[in-house]
Amino acid sequence: MKNLIFVILFYTCFNTISFAQNSSAGSLAAAKAFLATLDKEQLAIINYPYESEERSNWYFIPKERNGLWLKSMTDVQKAAAMNLLKSTLSEQGQEKAIAIIQLEIILKELENIPNSDRRNPLKYYFTIFGKPDAKSFWGWRVEGHHLSLNFTSENNKIVSGTPLFMGNNPAIVPSGEQKGYQILKNECNFAFELLNSFDEKQLKKAIASPVAPYDMFTLNSKQFGRLPEEGILYTDMTKEQQIKLMQIVSLYVKNYPFGFADEFMNKIEKAGLDKLRFVWMGEKQYGGKGHYYRIQNDVLLIEYDNTQNNANHVHTVVRDFTNDFGEDMLRRHYALEHKK
């Protein structure tokens, strides 16, 4: 089974085999370089203690946030901030994140609000938790409308990369020069391909409701429990369907830097592929009607929802039941410290 995962992850998703260790060295260097461009007032805005409750204060709507936003930065600082964002994700993840930020320009045009900051590609905030250091816990967040990246590092390794939220409004640009543009295309298409490969018996298991929820069930929760044990199990799928399911999982996981992605995928596998469930709600065909899916086992939760704006508004999230915001790693760290 492990060979199957590696074939999918390495060949389907990464195209070339490139064994890399999990390291946060690139993000550490980028964070230090970014902080070095800031003045004392900006440093006070961007930096929070690692243990601060602010670290789990995340959201994905166009609201004002704590942290330093791009609009308040000089060009040099903006470039350094974006280097931190790029260091946080794989090449695919970078492309999606930057495209999500730039989509604000299109959304502003579609909504005809030229003088509003509500849809502003500079309304994205950077926050640093703790002191960036190769030997200690520290974290960083990049967040704005439809993007929330939450990462934790310890001993120069990424130990947590969830929640990771990416969304699009519009999911597919309806008009103008960019008509038809779709950032999260495969997140949609791969799931419909899997759904439409099921026979009637499998569909009865997979579809939990003919109506999609208005949004993701977990929303922006800090703590969350397992969602209902419904949907179709990995073991109830054919080999071809299992590969399709793992292509979806890999699609989300490969937004992370390779070393962390590899470790996260191994963790998902150890929790049991036989426990993976695929749940569908809503319309079975794409086109103007709401649809939702999720994938979960004891470690992984992926939610995808497209119901708002006549089903042209996507929300997706990856979460780790065991280590969101690096909480599990932090508890272990404190337990070891108390034993000394």
Image (spheres, helix red, strand yellow):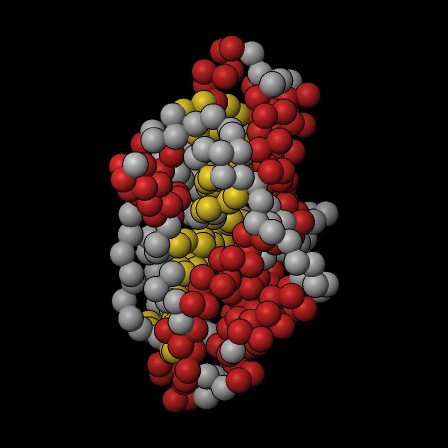
Q: Quadrant location of residue 19?
A: bottom right
Residue 236 in the image: state x and y as whole percent. 41, 84
Q: Is residue 327 visible?
A: no
Residue most extreme to the top: 40
What's the residue at 63%, 49% (across, down)?
90
Residue 40 in the image: state x and y as whole percent. 51, 10
Q: Is residue 150 above or below residue 4?
A: above
Residue 110 in the image: state x and y as whole percent. 58, 42
Residue 211 in the image: state x and y as whole percent. 35, 68
Position of residue 325 in the picture relative to residue 73 (left or right): left
Q: Is residue 287 above or below residue 196?
A: above
Quarter holding the C terminus is: top left
What's the residue at 51%, 57% (across, down)?
263
Q: Is residue 86 above or below residue 19?
A: above
What's the residue at 63%, 38% (across, down)?
26
Position of residue 14 in the picture relative to residue 339 (left or right): right
Q: Is residue 57 visible?
A: yes
Count of labels in the image: 0
What's the residue at 41%, 53% (across, down)?
319
Q: Is residue 22 above or below residue 145?
A: below
